Image (cartoon, grey):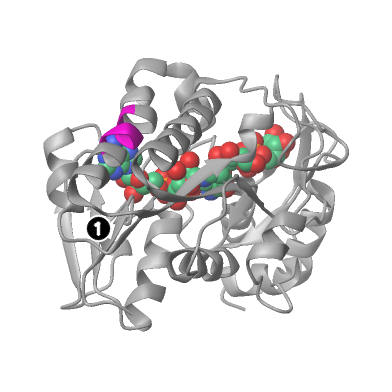
Amino acid sequence: MTDSPILVTGGAGFIGSNLVDALIARGYTVRVLDNFSTGKRSNLPVSDRLELIEGDVADAQTVHRAVEGCAAVVHLAAVASVQASVEDPVGTHQSNLVGTLNLCEAMRQNGVRRVVFASSAAIYGNNGEGQSIDENTPKAPLTPYAADKLASEHYLDFYRSQHGLEPVVFRFFNIYGPRQDPSSPYSGVISIFTERAQKGLPIAVFGDGEQTRDFLYVGDLVELLVQALEVATVEEGAINVGLNRATSLNGLLAAIGDVLGGLPPVSYQAARSGDIRHSRANNARLLQRFRLPEPATDMRDGLAKLLGR
Ligand code: NAD
Ligand code: UD1
């Protein structure tokens, strides 16, 4: 434990605000840097141990100010929608790559070493599809989002070897839970399905619903993020973050129906072009280095928490 703040970039977003709550509850002081592009002030707790800097990670001076005096950083600020990156590659790049590089440089200048970075399973593209995907699977970034995440990993590795940064690079698979914003058509599928099911609105499945994802409850992810801040030493190499469990969308809908006692009409539409069919994490490296909550939150319990049941 340290009196110096933990900087959480993107701390007003879905994952970030869940992390901020956990850090405050554990007695940390937290500094959030967020431009509120998708994050919300109302996601943040009221606490005298929370400091807020409204600003952009693409602005080097702002990032320098945010890093100054910090004990460590969790870097979550990014355009999180893959489709948004397809529509605006240049704008996305400012947040998703320039932001990471600004952070690395500000950390070097301020002598801050530990940084936990939110990379993504998207960097594997379609490689490893249908198997459990390990970290050595060839990378195939198919979108600006994935290209920026992979390039960010390379920059972090450069600052590790040249300047002694201690990056913990987590490749998140599909995260879900409270505060995931369902408002865009490209929002996470669980946030969309649960919101529509609660409101009794029709649900659209793209494809036959037999595609699978490896869903991890945000509360379990937060436990890992805190451990990554606290572990004494950091080993080289990125780490997949998932449960190595495949859930189909049809299985997901059945679980939502179970928790709510019924479902609105469900229609099956054309699959999204470029959609990955099966995505499941080989999490052996994660389990070697970190402790997942035991037991990890299963889908039904996670949905019940999300739906307040
Ligand atoms: P989110 O959109 O809720 O959070 C992102 C936060 O970053 C928001 O608060 C937003 O306002 C802020 N932000 C965006 N651009 C910024 C900028 N230029 N400067 C300052 N703040 C900025 O999304 P999330 O799901 O919480 O994602 C958090 C991180 O995890 C992202 O880096 C995302 O790419 C990564 N990730 C998420 C998932 C998932 O399943 N949710 C999977 C893989 C990776
Ligand atoms: C998600 C993340 C991405 C991350 C990747 C890592 C989001 C929004 N995207 O992408 O940031 O890098 O995991 O694994 O969190 N679907 C429907 N109906 C809908 C919405 C979606 O059928 O209304 C389907 C999609 O076509 C897809 C599946 O649900 O087959 C999952 O989609 P989505 O939640 O957008 O996640 P990913 O594309 O896996």
Residue 185 drawn above or below residue 233: above
| Residue at x-position 51% and y-position 70% | 227
In the figure, residue 109 lies in which quadrant?
top left
Q: To which residue does mark 1 refer?
A: 32
| Residue at x-position 18% and y-position 33% | 59
- Quick one: SS at disc 1? strand
Marker count (numbered): 1
Residue 87 rendering spot, x and y as whole percentages: 45, 17
Q: Where does ligand 2 appear, by image quarter?
A: top right
In the figure, residue 15 lies in which quadrant?
bottom left
Q: In which quadrant will I find the N terminus? A: bottom left
Residues in magenta, as a range = 98-102
Residue 81 rendering spot, x and y as whole percentages: 49, 34
Q: Nearer the viewer, residue 96 or 206?
A: 96
Asked whether residue 176 is in view, the answer is: yes
In the figure, residue 79 lies in which quadrant?
top left
What's the amino acid at mark 1? Val
Q: Nearer the viewer, residue 303 or 14?
A: 14
User: What secondary structure predominates along the stretch shown in magenta?
Assistant: helix
